[in-house]
Image (cartoon, grey):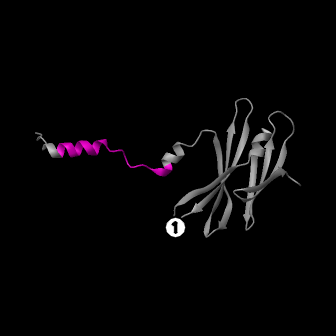
Amino acid sequence: MFRKLPPTLAVAVGLLATLPARADEILDGIAKMPGAVEDARIGGTWEGNGKTGAFRLVIARVGGDTITARFFVQWIAYLEGGGAKVENTIEIKELADLKVDVIDFNSESDQNGLSVYLQTLNPNGGGDQTYELFVTSPTEYRFGPASN
């Protein structure tokens, strides 16, 4: 046999049922990530202005029959207590302007910044190429054909 709840308790139970479930910031962020993002890697570490962190390298691909890549560098800062946050993000627009796909890349970092070597595939058959990217800050980088 069931007993009827007092009106105040019934209201309280009803309010609790309408509250949203506790959010999971990581799950929510990953769920919002565009489908075009196909590769994300840690490319090295950085240190500056009393902070430390990692470089995250992100490739997004766009297109239908002709796939081209966009390349992004992010500065992920490590927070006290074990968290992390995105400090800066830049896009290497010169790569996007080439309208090529990135088939592989490797990277290394040191006290001067980040070096990335990208192997590309020209979807129009114009010849594959290797490029170098040197990032020294969120406002300064150099991108061009590899010198080797």
In which quadrant will I find the C terminus? bottom right
Measuring from the top left, give residue 73's x and y in whole percent: 68, 53
**Residue projecting furthest to the top:** 65
**Type of residue at label 1?**
Glu
Q: Which residue is depicted at the point 67% across and 63% down?
A: 45
Relative height, residue 91 to residue 127 (above, below): below
Instruction: Judge from the rendering whether residue 87 lies leftward or rightward of residue 93; answer left or right.
Output: left
**Residue projecting furthest to the right:** 148
**Residue projecting furthest to the front:** 139
Relative height, residue 88 to residue 101 (above, below): below
- Provide the major secondary structure of the magenta segment: helix
Measuring from the top left, give residue 87's x and y in whole percent: 60, 57
Q: Residues within 10 Å of mark 1 (few under 14, many from 20)?
A: few
Q: Quadrant of residue 101?
A: top right
Label 1, on which residue? 80
Range shown magenta: 9-26
Relative height, residue 116 to residue 33 (above, below): below
Measuring from the top left, give residue 4's x and y in whole percent: 11, 40
Q: Which residue is depicted at the point 63% across and 68% down?
A: 49
Does the magenta segment cover residue 29? Answer: no
Measuring from the top left, give residue 132's x and y in whole percent: 81, 53
Q: Quadrant of residue 38?
A: top right
Q: Which residue is depicted at the point 32% across and 44% down?
A: 19
**Total count of labels:** 1
Q: Which residue is depicted at the point 75% across and 54% down?
A: 106
In which quadrant will I find the N terminus? top left
Instruction: Judge from the rendering whether residue 68 lies leftward or rightward of residue 1; answer left or right.
Output: right
Q: Quadrant of residue 79?
A: bottom right
Q: Secondary structure at mark 1?
A: loop
Does the magenta segment cover residue 12? Answer: yes
